[in-house]
């Protein structure tokens, strides 16, 4: 399974990031939730800080472009193999920086990728 960091995680069950954390766990993925506020999603802690994680396969972004620049160093420190930019989180600058570092970049919906077996 693919260790996934969900950036922009929310304890609000109406948010897509919340649904993504639940669905990733349901599909057996190791999930690390990072959000603006500490909290919890069905037993998964939402970290308000930037936990140092190893062996990260995927970062799935739920933070809008204008709020992403302070996260760049953290994102690259995780050394992900892939970054998924969910709808509303697209960022050409970060996508170019990631591509230059050899990180696969995808503009897609994590929930859809999981449901169609393309995650």
Image: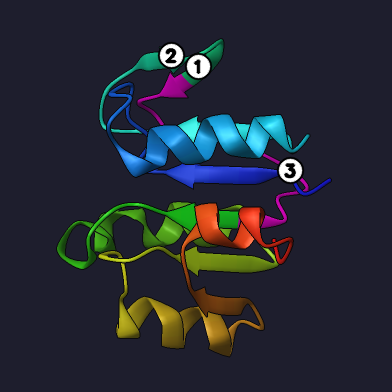
Q: Which mark is residue 76?
A: none
Residue stretch rendered in magenta on the structure: 46-58
User: Is residue 5 found left or right of 67 in the rendered image?
Assistant: right
- Label 2 sits on a secondary structure element that is strand
Q: Earlier in the sequence, mark 2 or mark 3?
A: 2
Residue at the (43%, 22%) spot, across then down: 46
Where residue 91 appears, x then y in whole percent? 30, 76
Q: Residues within 10 Å of mark 2 (few under 14, many from 20)?
A: some
| Relative height, residue 114 to residue 32 (above, below) | below
Q: Circle 2 is placed at which residue position?
A: 40
Cα–Cα span, label 1 and label 3: 17 Å
Where residue 10 appears, x then y in whole percent? 32, 29
Cα–Cα span, label 1 and label 2: 4 Å
Residue at the (22%, 60%) spot, across then down: 64
- Label 1 sits on a secondary structure element that is strand
Q: In which quarter of the image is the N terminus?
A: top right
Residue at the (15%, 64%) spot, across then down: 66
Q: Circle 1 is placed at which residue position?
A: 45
Q: Which of marks 1 and 3 is nearer the N terminus?
A: 1
Cα–Cα span, label 2 and label 3: 21 Å
Q: Is the magenta stretch mostly helix, strand or loop?
A: loop
Q: Is there CB contact under 8 Å for labels 1 and 2?
A: yes
Q: Circle 3 is placed at which residue position?
A: 54
Q: Quadrant of the C terminus?
A: bottom right
Q: How crowded is mark 3: few (under 14 residues within 10 Å), some or many (20 or more)?
A: few
* 110 within the magenta span: no
Where residue 52 appears, x then y in whole percent? 60, 36
Quadrant position of residue 43 = top right
| Relative height, residue 78 to residue 99 (above, below) | above
Q: How crowded is mark 1: few (under 14 residues within 10 Å), some or many (20 or more)?
A: some
Residue 58 seen anywhere in this rendered image of the structure: yes
- Label 3 sits on a secondary structure element that is loop
């Amino acid at each position: 399974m693919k260790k996934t960091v969900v950036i922009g995680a929310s304890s609000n069950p109406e948010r897509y990031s919340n649904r993504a954390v639940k669905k990733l766990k349901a599909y057996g993925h190791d999930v690390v939730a990072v959000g603006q506020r500490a909290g919890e999603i069905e037993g998964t802690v939402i970290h308000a800080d930037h936990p140092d994680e190893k062996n990260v396969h995927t970062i799935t972004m739920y933070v809008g472009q204008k709020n992403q620049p302070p996260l760049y160093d953290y994102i690259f420190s995780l050394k992900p193999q892939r970054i998924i930019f969910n709808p509303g989180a697209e960022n050409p600058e970060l996508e170019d920086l990631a591509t230059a570092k050899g990180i696969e970049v995808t503009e897609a919906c994590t929930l859809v990728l999981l449901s169609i077996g393309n995650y």
